Image (cartoon, coloured by chain):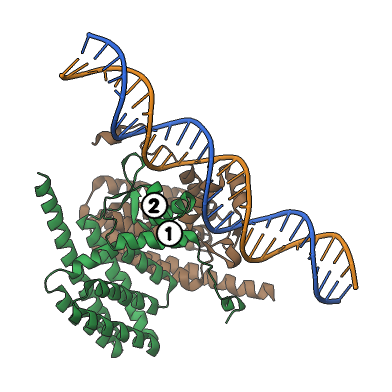
Chain colours: A green, B brown, C blue, D orange
Amino acid sequence: MNIEDLRVVANPTLVREHALEKLRGAIASGLYRPGTRLVERELCEALGVSRTSVREALRQLQSEGLIEAGPRRAIIVSVLSPDDAYDIYTLREMVETRAIRQFVAHGDPKALKRLQTIYKAIEKHAAKGDLPALAEMSGAFYEEILEGSRSKVVGETGRQLLKRVSYLRLASMSAPQRVEAGLGEWRAIVDAVCAGDADAAAKALGQHIRTARDTIVARLRDEAQGGTLRRA
Amino acid sequence: MNIEDLRVVANPTLVREHALEKLRGAIASGLYRPGTRLVERELCEALGVSRTSVREALRQLQSEGLIEAGPRRAIIVSVLSPDDAYDIYTLREMVETRAIRQFVAHGDPKALKRLQTIYKAIEKHAAKGDLPALAEMSGAFYEEILEGSRSKVVGETGRQLLKRVSYLRLASMSAPQRVEAGLGEWRAIVDAVCAGDADAAAKALGQHIRTARDTIVARLRDEAQGGTLRRA
DNA sequence: ACATCAACTTTGTATGACAATCATAATCTA
DNA sequence: TAGATTATGATTGTCATACAAAGTTGATGT
C-alpha cells in the first residue's frame, strides 16, 4: 500500500463534488425531469453553495450528457429520444458483455460473493415490492460487473452509459411483469458467473439488457405518443 | 429549417469553449505531455482568460478523462498505461464497427463522397510524408465514420474514446511501415463501404483498429521499459 | 547537519461586478 | 382600446478579488 492511501481522508470532500452528486441524484431520482430548465441561482440556494461550485458541477454534468444547452443559453436536463435510449442500451450491451467476460476470467471469489449478495438484496426488495430500493440495487449490480472487469476504461465507459439512463430505471421497473422477468434474468447471470461460464454469462447479460432496452424504448415511444395527443 | 438556425452565430463562441479546444489541442499535439502538471495561473496567462473560464474548461477535460487529479490536488495530463490504451482501442473497435455498419446501411452518397475525399487527402499526405497532416486526416476519417452512423450516442461515445488516444496518433504514424500498411487498410475500408458491403467494411475497420492498437501498445510498453532503464 | 519557522504558491471556494441577451411589465400613442 | 415602445428584471458568461487550507521552499538558528 502506498503511503498516500493512509490519509484519513484521501479526497477531502470537495464542495463541487458534493454538488455534482446531489444534482446527479436529483436527475436520477426524477426530481428534475428531462427538459426541466436548471437555473443557477436556484441551484445555489437549494444546495447552499456558491455559483462557482454550481457552475463547475454543471460543466461536468454537461460533458456527461446529463444536461445540455437549450435555446438561448438555458441549461436543461437532457431529453433522451427513444432512439437515443435504444443506442445507449445497445452500447451498454457491448461494454457490459465484455466486462462480464473479464469478470468471469478473473474468477475472483470475493467479487463473486459481492455479486451474489447484491442479487440476494434484489430478491428481497422484489419480494417486498420496494421499487426504489430495487432500482438502486440493480444499479449496484451493473456497477459490480463493471468493477469486476478490472479495467479502468471499460468501467468508466460503462458507467458513463449507465448514468445517462439512470433516471429511466425506476420507470422501467414499474412495467407489468418486468420485475418478475428481471429476477430470472439476474439469476441466470449470477448462475453463469458462478459456473465460471463466460459465454453463458455474456449471453444472459446481453439478453437481459436487450429486454430492458425494449421495455424502455416501448415506454418512451408511448410517452411521446401520449404527449403528442395530450398536447393536441 | 428551424428559425433558430438562421442566426449568424448560433453559438456565439464562448470563452470557455475556446479555452477547452486550445487545451485539448495542446494535449493532442503533445505540447502538454502525459504526466505534466497543469497550473491554473499559467494556463490563464497562456490563454489570456480568467481563472473562472480555465477552471470550467478543466472540469470538462477532467470528465473526458484527458486530465486527472494527481497527488495533493494537482491536475496532471492523464497517463495512459499500455493496458488502458489496449482497452480504449478494443472499445473503439466495438463502437466504430457498429458505426460503419450503420454508415453502410444508410447508403448516403454524400457521406461516401466525403469519406473518399478524406481518403484521397490521406494518400496525398502519405506520399509527401507529412505526418502531422496525416494524423489529422486520419482523425477526420474516424470522425466521418462516427458521423455517418447518424446516432448521437454512438458518435459521442466514439469521440470520447478517440479524444483519449488522440495524442498517440502522431507517434503511431511514425512507426516503420505503419503508414504504408495503414494506407492499404484505409483503402480496404473505403472500398468495402463503396461496395455497400457492411460485413467487409466492419471487418476491415476492425482489422485496422486492432493493428493500430498493437502498434501503439507495443510502443507504450517499450517506452515504459526504456523509461525504467533510463531512470535506473 | 538538522530542526524550525517564515514567506510564497497553488487550489478551492465565495463574493461582487458588469455586459449582453431575453422576457415581462409599464407606458405611450394613434 | 390596440399596438408599439420603453423601462425593468432575470439570467448567463466572464472577470477580478479575496481568503483559508495545505504544501513547498528557503532562510535561520542550533
Q: Is residue B180 visible?
A: no
Crowding at label 1, few (<14), some or many (≥20) Cα neighbours within 10 Å? many
The residue to which callout 1 is attached is A19
Instruction: Name the N-terminal-most of marks 2 and 1.
Output: 1
What element does badge 1 sit on?
Answer: helix
Chain for disc number 1: A
The quadrant of the picture occupied by the N terminus of chain B is: top left
- Residue A118 or residue B176, whichever sits in front: A118
Residue A166 in which image quadrant: bottom left
Decide which of A184, D22 is in the foreground and name it.
Answer: D22
What is the x, y in percent for residue A12? 54, 67
Q: Which mark is residue B7?
A: none
Which residue lies under the disc numbered 2?
A43
Residue B127, position as x, y percentages in the image:
48, 51
Amino acid carrying mark 2 in the image? Leu
Q: Position of residue B162 (x, y in %)?
A: 42, 59
Question: Where, by quadrant of the figure, is residue B186 drawn?
Answer: bottom left
Q: Are marks 2 and 1 in contact (CB under 8 Å)?
A: yes
Q: How far across and how far down the image is residue B88, in percent?
A: 42, 67
